Amino acid sequence: MRMIAIVVVSAALGAGALPVTAQQPGATRDTARVLSYPIPPAGRLVAITNATIMTASNGTIPNGTIVIRDGKIAAVGANVSVPAGAQVIDGNGKYVIPGIVDAHSHSASEAINEGTQSITAQVRMEDVLRQDALGLYRELAGGVTTLNILHGSANTIGGQNATVKVRWGLPADSLLFQGAPPGIKFALGENVRQTNRTVLPGQERRYPRTRMGVEELLRDAFTRAQEYRREWQEYERGRKNVKRGQAAPMPPKRDLQLDALVEVLEGKRLVHCHSYRADEILMMLQVAKDFGFRVASFQHVLEGYKVADEIAAAGSGASTFADNWAYKLEAFDAIPHNAALMAERGVRVSINSDSDERARRLYQEAAKAMHYGGASEDEALRMITLNPAWQLGIDKRVGSIEVGKDADLAIFNGHPFAPASRVEMTLIDGRVFFDRRTAPTLEHLMELIRQKQGPRQVTEVVP
Amino acid sequence: MKARRRRLRIADCGCLAIALLGTSAGAQTQSAISPAQGAPAQSAIVVIRNATIVPVTGPRIQNGSIVLRGDRIEAIGPNVAAPSGARVIDGSGLFVYPGMIDGGTQLGLTEIGSVPGGEDTQEVGDFNPHNVALTAVNPHSELIPVTRVNGVTTVITAAEGGLISGQAGLIDLMGWTPAEMAVRRHAAMVVSYPSLGGGGGGGGFRGPQRSDAERREELDRRTRSLRSYFADARAYAEMKGRVATAGGVRKVNQAMEAMTPIMRGETPVIFDVTTADQIRGVLALADTFGIKVVLRGAREAWRLADSLAMRKIPVIVGPLTSVPDADDPYDMTYANPGVLARAGVKIAFQTSDAANSRNLPYNAALAVAYGLDADAALRALTINAAEIFGVADRYGSLAPGKVANVVVTTGDPMDVRSVVRHLFIRGQPVPLDDRHTRLYEQFRARPRTQ
């Protein structure tokens, strides 16, 4: 079913047609008939000229041009000429940054927590993606182009992630970031222990209830995964060495949960671990070391600044909030200097949203790393672009403005960290998925009311 | 009389603080006392020189000076002589702003969201007009220094929920006791205007499923209930007046007593609303009862901007981080303040937060990005809020005679990259440390592990 869907979509895109119209976000009774949302064509030759280009990898180009060919960045620099036939986007007075990568999102998810058991490595976020989730459109309007859609934090080992590009309006399957390494959500602390959950009369508490129990579950799960892998290895060996006349060995029972954990053991599936306190971060690092895998990113990691050296030494990333704190006990030692301090200690840090709301203004969140702890402008920019891309294993594809990378870009009307700045245009694979000039803004809606009801009726007067 | 009492109080705690501080008195960044309580009181004179002064109610002054004496601003101008004995702060490259005012927080009433023991934000029952937020404000909350070091010096704090949630206090974010923090103990009554509730469901997480008809019925019932409470309050206030004139005695009802200044139009009512429908309901209520209305939240107030301007009803917008409904334009929350201000509505901002009320100016920044004039945003963060709560004679701008809530920054406070360098609340230097800077310094000094 999935295969068929992909074929249909790519056929439609390949033809360069505009076959799809999406439900226009913000389409009210006033606007629904007026607006439609054409899905942008693919594969065009595009040039963004005269813009300030913040590359995230090679500093800022004050007056530069970006050429996009077939969805990839073909050239970038101060002295780049515009190829004949290119569609030109005038970047005069504008700032271009790499499309924002949000390393912790629950957008477009029909459900996020399979909370019945504490180990649910078998469930997959890509099975519950919704292409019509409005959060996606609003994230585009905030310059976000890639999301790490994670399972919730109810379980010690939650479900498998979906790395997606915010291709709003296209069918759910075409949201998937093709070629992104698979990942999985782990979680520690209060949520997994169900600390703040009201237990109804007669209801039994779910194991684990302590941080010790969380460690035990992890070790148990990975011990089972090791044994499962050994069974399969023995089976494969036995199958190859079957002697004439001997019966072929029976394959072990396929276990979808342990399959995912074996991929973790073999470094083929990235672990994104929800965590708060320093002690549980150290525990997770020790478990990972004992079983021979790396934690790709600690998520939230609000006390990461206390054990930054240990995180850096393990080669793990840290993806944190800019300044969210005090909402629960394990968030009471959270400090807004966390991102800058971990970076100072050599950790690759990203700032994430974990929320459809914060995702719309991650650029403002990133600037907080400059405010608290004094990160440089480049470092702050990398915290929402190149660093999260690295944590998701897609930094060869996205996260900076470099030749050969996907043309995922956000264009601002001013410096992205300045107070009066907003996103004017967002491109993914060189296609304009958001353009404020045609977006359903409040101004647009008021203009429609003005046209329909006359200039004096824009805002009603209640006498 | 009042002013003298305040000065006496400051002098008293000044002795105590100096005793505690020993030799470090006067050092801006040192504090021997818990910063939760605020700075030691000092009667020193401070002058900040060579700074760009942004008084809000007057033009910017380049290379200007500002003199703080006691708890007041004494002088501002391009050529102000430093009084002898004044502590001089070189403000070269820095900017001086009045302290910002958050029109809606739960500061002091909450500490750690998930720990019920520290939560005094919501009372049982629908009608609690006699509950006074300042009673439960914890002056030593860790959240308070975290807020003020970002330049937010004064906030409305109040409980929420029910229909009449209680009385909001206007407080300065410094003081040893709630009374010391108070700017106005009875700043406003908070009403949570009824809204069309959700349809429930969601696997039981959002309560039992309800039909549209049931939701409407519930809304009508709650709206009638609120109206009838106001009617009772009006009757009580009238009767109270008549009894007073006749020299009689009447049984006291605490809740109705608390409503009396509201019904007499002496104290404003903050109506927490979201939609245009709710605002229409509030306007009808105002017409019936002649109460002084302040709208808060009011994401859809743009639909009634001209009405609100004509009626001179102020709107405390925010939080700007609230997400519009599915049918709404994507930028509706961000663009609403600009539409209101252009229509002539007096606006201020709220975060509706506690732990992150420090983000107040960044709320305003989002409004500026989507059409609010930057100067109008600054007024909304300062003088407008002071006017709405009737303290503009003392708060909301930099002017001689005003309370010296003064923020010295590296730039526009709405710019996240700007940093506060000096802070004064009621003329007293406030240490720029808090729970976060203490943990930061502590772990920044952790020896490197190999």
Image (tube, helix red, strand yellow):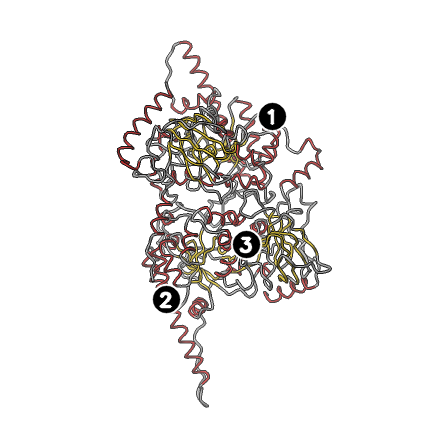
Q: Residue furthest bottom?
A: A244
Q: Disc 3 versus disc 2: distance between alpha carbons?
A: 31 Å
Q: Are marks 3 and 2 in contact (CB under 8 Å)?
A: no
Label 3 resides on the chain identified as A
The image position of residue A134, as x and y in percent, is 58, 50
According to the picture, the residue beneath numbered tag 1 turns out to be B310
Q: Are marks 1 and 2 on the same chain?
A: no
According to the picture, the residue beneath numbered tag 3 turns out to be A100
In this rendering, the answer to whether A56 lies above or below B235 is below
The image position of residue B366, as x and y in percent, is 54, 42
Q: Hey, which quadrant is residue B6 in on the image?
A: top left
The image position of residue A124, as x and y in percent, is 50, 61
Q: Residue furthest right?
A: A85
The image position of residue B98, as x and y in percent, is 47, 32
Viewer-proximal residue among B73 and B372: B73
Is residue A200 in view from this perspective? no
Mark 1: secondary structure: helix
* Residue neighbourhood size for the residue with mark 2, other residues' Cα within 10 Å, grouped as few (<14), some (14–19), many (≥20): few
According to the picture, the residue beneath numbered tag 2 turns out to be A289
**Amino acid type, label 1:** Met
* Residue neighbourhood size for the residue with mark 1, other residues' Cα within 10 Å, grouped as few (<14), some (14–19), many (≥20): some
Label 2 resides on the chain identified as A
Of the image marks 3 and 2, the number of the one nearer the N terminus: 3
